[in-house]
Image (cartoon, coloured by chain):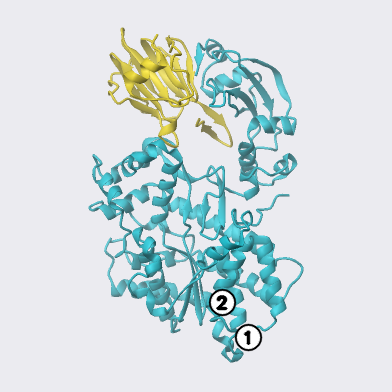
Amino acid sequence: MNPPGPARPTTGDREPAPAHRAEDDGEPARTHRAQDDRGPAHTHQAQDDLDGTAAGRRAWMSAARACYREIGVPFPERVIWVSSPLVGAFAAPIAACLNTGHRNRRVLDSVYRAVDETAGERVGQAVRAAVQAATGGTVSDPVHGAAATALHADVARAMKSALASAARLAPAHDGSGGEPTGSGAPDTAARPPVDASDAAARAAAYAWNLAVPAVQSALADASVAAVSAAVDAAVGGTRQDTIRGEVRRLWQAHISGQRSGTWLKLVDRFEQDAVPPLDENRAEALDQGPAGVLDQGPAEALDQGLSGAREQDPAGRRDEAGQVALRGMPAGWWWWPFRDFAMLCPRPTDLRLEQVGEGGRARHRPHRADGPAVGWDDGFGLYFWDGTHVTQAVIEDTLTTDEILREANAEIRRCAIERRGWDRFIAEAGLDQIGPAVPDPGNLGQTLALYDVPADVYSTHVRVLLCTNGTVERDGTRRRFGLTVPADCHDPVQAAAWTYGLSPAQYAKAQRRS
Amino acid sequence: MPTLEQAIATFGVTVDEHLDRQAEIPILSGLQFQGDVAVVPVNREPARTPIPEAGVPVVRGQAEANTHLLLATGKAYFAAEQRFDGLVLGVLTVAEGATAFLAHPEHAYTGIAPGTYELRRQREQADQTRFVAD
């Protein structure tokens, strides 16, 4: 079968140049002394400040601080921003073990090696750096015993009262209400679009129009799945020991704690004074719109919000949409609260979106054909095809035809076939042809061919029509592509006619295809 | 029949460089296709909304690069379908003496003679019917 494989970094294990890595290593774990989160921006965050990331992180830490206050535990001095959720999932439990006096170096080394081998050395190095930062570089005296206790459960219980306290201290600006709600799936949809009265608010509204809550929720689910698979690959084997057990135990505890809508509301509470500022060009472009961004569909908003340079660079434009969507998400992604340290991880740094639908019906979803659609700085990434979370193997097109056909999830099967291309898949899977290939009316010299797709490949029985483009590509070839059609289509012209809602007789009279 | 070069000069909407600039654009009144868009001659109430000089993006792709842009010389009208089922994008009416064009970076220009047409979007059968993006 084809389990969601460990999400491996895309560059780390392909560019093993040591000098390159040494440079990367300095970055992943950032330790802040506890008081820093209220202080002025750090110099190394200067770039982050431009898009409001530093302010967002301060809000995230303020929310964490509020939870500690509720449970009566001093906020730890060691606050570490790790480079990705995967790094936190390994580094937090490892650091907790070391801080409670774990002394077996051989076990520790074997866990690090397992991380290197399954998640890539770049993630492995980031894990070591984060552990170092969380343990202060020395194995502390086990007299601290309970000092490394994970506080997930306590914090989860305290979130509601922390939110209530925060609401009492600072009434909401936006009237969204201070009533805490129960835990559940991230309840980001509860936040109403803000009044588009200034550039910053318009930017938030614009991000909202990119369907940020839906994208964020898809990313959250995919993060859980990918990290679960990676944790399983690294420490889920038959070999077990204290650290491996702790990584698995904490991961389970962690997943249940991260799905709290109350937490996001709490972060939101601290973020209201820190709406990410836009850079001036974009703010001006937004201001010049004939109507408020709120009144428009995402496509129009995108047109006005993005400047002309991207019209020559479609890919760049898509990245820009992703960057805007990212800025609409909380600056933090997950966090791991302990008595003696807190580990936090930022939202992704890269997001590729594609637009589906037109005008007011347009929406966006993660998609990328040549790499991870979602990425963190250490190379950890999530792969998406047309909004569906898939494995790296699907996107890199390394599965065998058998592996595709035996994939248990019909949606992922479909993505894998589309990624490969129907013309290749038809040949490799030896699909049965229905009737002979026929000339494509209006498309001189080209043919249409129909194939049966076995009933268990898609969740509904379909056939696939193999067509050829009416215009040539740059290299002089014509692109061939497959379109799925209802299984009751019994000849290629009937199938082609169905795709446009025409009768076969109408389609046969086509004069031109370009 | 205008050449591709002439059409680009008229509308200022360019297409991929490798496409032959001297190729003539047939102006047709029958069924034709431009990628995932069909121009279907129909017997319907003519459209009455003039096509603006800047054109109407009848299908907007992932990026500007994939837009099918409806343009015209002379009097031509386009009414986007109100009851949106996705398959019919709208009704196009080209007056006598006028010519409409669909422009697309990869598919170049499609010339449309006087008459009334439905512009349709290609669909695909998946778990539910969805629309094709080229």
Q: Residues within 10 Å of mark 2 (few under 14, many from 20)?
A: some
Q: Amino acid at mark 2?
A: Gln
- Amino acid on which the number 1 mark rests in the picture: Gly
The vertical placement of A347 against A400, above or below, is below
Residue displayed at 68% across by 32% down: A424
Q: Which mark is nearer the camera, 2 or 1?
A: 2
Q: Does the image show residue B45? A: no
Mark 2: which secondary structure? helix
Which residue is found at the position 45% from the left and 37% from the top?
Answer: B62
Residue A124 falls in which quadrant of the image? bottom right
Colour in which chain A is shown? Answer: cyan
Q: Position of residue B59 (x, y in %)?
A: 42, 29
Residue A309 - label: none
Same chain assignment for discs 2 and 1: yes
Sequence order check: which comes first, mark 2 or mark 1?
Answer: 1
x, y (%) of residue A509? 53, 10
Position of residue A489 in the picture relative to residue B32 (left or right): right
Q: Residue at x 33, y 24 (%)?
A: B12
Chain letter behind tag 1: A
Quadrant location, the N terminus of chain B = top left
Residue on which the image places disc 1: A101
Specify the farthest residue to the bottom. Answer: A143
Rendered residue at 67%/84% (across/down): A103
Provide the letter of the chain coloured yellow.
Answer: B
Query: Which residue, given by chain and number where applicable, does mark 2 sit on?
Result: A132
Residue A222 in view of the camera: yes
Label 2 vs label 1: CA separation?
A: 14 Å
The chain letter under disc 2 is: A
Q: Residues within 10 Å of mark 1 (few under 14, many from 20)?
A: some
Q: Measured from the top left, where is residue A281 in percent x and y?
A: 28, 48
Q: Position of residue A214 (x, y in %)?
A: 45, 51
Say which element carries label 1: loop
